[in-house]
Image: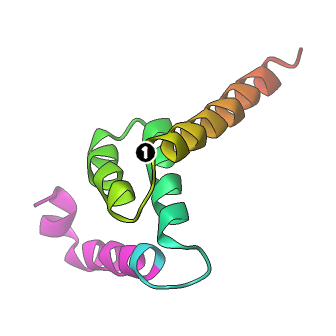
Amino acid sequence: MSILNETLPKAAEAYEHMTDVVLREDNFLDPKTKELIAIVAGVLVRCQPCIDIHLPRAYEVGCTREEISEALAVAMCISAGSQIAWTKI
């Protein structure tokens, strides 16, 4: 249990609700795309628990190692580009 659950249970419930709506309901993106986004976001924000949760889910919904690798490469390009832009070269 996180400190958020202990101290602000309504906020924790709101997060769980958002997760259910965004990641588990059928909206506009398919489950594979959602899990690829979740993995690369987890990598970019350096969230090991996120990666530990979403990597197995990605395989469960049919993502391949190659798709995950390419999604990571795209994220790396965007991240590197943002750093170059900050240097104002």
Quadrant location, the N terminus:
bottom left
Residue at 40% x, 35% y is: 46
Q: Looking at the picture, how far across and down is residue 43, in whole percent? A: 45, 38
Q: Is residue 8 magenta?
A: yes
Give 51 or 59, whichever is nearer the viewer.
Answer: 59
Number of marks in the image? 1
Of residues 41 and 8, the one nearer the viewer is: 41
- Looking at the picture, which amino acid does disc 1 mark? Gly
Q: Position of residue 65 (x, y in %)?
A: 44, 42
Seen from the viewer's position, the closer of residues 39 and 46 is 39
Residue, disc 1: 42
The residue at 34%/45% (across/down) is 51
Q: Which residues are magenta?
A: 1-21
22 vs 89: above or below: below
Main SS, magenta residues? helix
Question: How would you rate the neighbour count of disc 1 (Cα within 10 Å): few for under 14, some for 14-19, many for 20 or more?
Answer: some
The structure residue drawn at horizontal position 49% and vertical position 64%, both measured from the top left corner, is: 32
Q: Nearer the viewer, residue 87 or 39?
A: 39
Q: Relative to residue 25, is residue 48 depicted above or below? A: above
| Residue at the spot 43% in from the left edge and 82% down from the top edge | 21
Q: Is residue 70 left or right of residue 78?
A: left
